[in-house]
Image: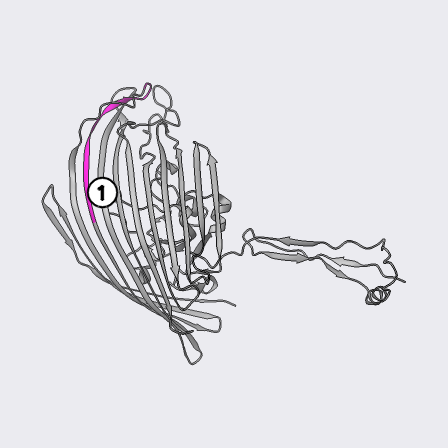
Amino acid sequence: MQRSRVFYVFPLSLLVTGHALAADLVEKSDHAHRARTSGAKKAAPQPDANAVRAEKLEVHAHRPATVASSATKSDTPLIETAQSVTVVSRNEMDVRGVLSLNQAVRYTAGITPDLRSGGEGTRYDQFALRGFTVPTFLDGLKLQDSPTGYATAQTDTSRLERVEILKGPASALYGQSSPGGLVALSSKLPTDQKFYGGVNTTGGMFDLYRVDADVGGYATKDGMVRYRLYGTVNGQHSQMSKTGSRRFSISPSFTFGGNGPTTLTLLGNYQYDPENGTYGGEPLVGSLRPASYGYLPRNFYDGDVPFEKFNRRQGGITYIFNHRFNDNWSFTSRGRYDDIKTIYRSVYNNGYYTSNDMLSRSAFGTNEHTHNLAFDSQFKGHVRTGPLRHTMMFGFDYMQQSASEEGFYGSAPDLNVLHPDYHMAIPAMNPYLHYQTDSHQIGMYAQDEMRWKGLVVTGSLRNDWYRSQQNEYIYHTTSHENPRQITWRASACSYP
């Protein structure tokens, strides 16, 4: 008697960001029947009424990140890292439609996003990690904030390949940091493909428009020189009436050396934000508490249209040099120069009324300009001492900043909240701050990751030297700082 064919389908479990897998239906049939039908070459095949047609099913997804470099400055698997690290990949940012760094880290445990006006103030990436504000690193180098924080760079997420959120202290490798941790950004760089490219367009609420373009490939036939060029044009109105944001950004990059032992990558970026929302808000009475007239509208704006200004220009150039001496030892050096200039003017409410419907206001302005240098170089190697396997690293980093600021403050006419006039004459402001700050920081560090079977013990040691001088030209004062600090850490973890 002929046996019927039986098929087994094995269930395939996939994570949302799982790896691309292919599941084929498996057919099991009687060997005797298979031999008999293969031997009958001249006879026409007879359909089997009990047979089920086999189909091929392919499921495409993406593997979750298994390696992070922010915790150890090396490609250590997450399972061997004793510190909590969350990785947000480029694929995840694309799937979620991320438009800012706040949105990229929003679903990370321990993150409190959008600290300014519930997301209204978008000109800076303001969020907290484990209750602390944390520094941001781009391509392994710190993005240095200005002394007062106005000339601070903002990295458009269209430039990013991945985001790592390192939780907990990390000063033993990075120097002055935060107890909450840090955020490490990685730029898009040329890849090992002959040609690739694409254009994405996005539209949304508040007249959101966005066009992102990305193109790259081999500049030479053998791929020894590769290029990549990407940029964005975007803008939208904000929740507050009369305000909005616009941005233009372009980033060219070249990699020399292909897949050889020595490579050099040059990456540039220029970003211009002619306007970027407002820093205003609403008074307590009229928003959370009712006023005599009731409540203010949700899109209430407390500023002045022709006076409002936030203009930021930022540019930078980065190099990343890698050299492999052999299979065990390598050298990496990277550096970046940033130039950031911000012009800011705003009229804002003082939080109280001078009469039932007249809101008290003041005016503020600042012109700030920073020049930043950052370098980080390190030797990495693998050695064995008996049963122990060591991953060793010795590094040196340097940061320098020159920052200047002129600050202004003044009064502004009260605003009738029931019949607002957003084109009033704002009196000239008086200077209250004018300074020049120069700072330098040098750090030397070492790290040893020791492995024995499933046990990983990591030790890090660092020494920092810092000095700064600030000259204040209105009050004719000078201040100096010259601290130094030794930082260390030790950790251990085990895995199956």
Main SS of residues in magenta: strand
Q: Nearer the viewer, residue 113 or 399?
A: 399
Q: Report if residue 473 is visible in the image.
A: yes
At label 1, counting other C-alpha atoms closer than 10 Å, the crowd grade (few under 14, some 14-19, many 20 or more) is many
Give the percent coordinates (x, y) of residue 115.
Answer: 36, 41
**Vertical relation: 356 (above or below) 454:** above
Q: Is residue 33 left or right of residue 64?
A: right
**Residue at image x 14%, y 54%?**
480
**Vertical relation: 286 (above or below) 114:** above
| Quarter of the image where one finds residue 244 | top left
Query: Which contiguous range is marked in magenta?
Result: 403-419
Magenta segment: does it hold 84? no
Give the percent coordinates (x, y) of residue 240.
Answer: 37, 30
Most extreme residue toward the right, as rendered?
A: 1
Disc 1 residue type (three-letter): Glu
**Residue at image x 39%, y 36%?**
235
| Quarter of the image where one finds residue 321 | bottom left
Q: Is residue 221 left or right of residue 421?
A: right
Q: Number of marks in the image?
A: 1
Most extreme residue toward the front, as rendered?
A: 221
Q: Nearer the viewer, residue 308 or 391?
A: 308
| Quarter of the image where one finds residue 284 | top left
From the image, which quarter does the N terminus lie in?
bottom right
Q: Report if residue 129 is visible in the image.
A: no
Give the percent coordinates (x, y) of residue 169.
Answer: 34, 58
| Residue that label 1 marks | 368
Most extreme residue toward the bottom, as rendered?
A: 386
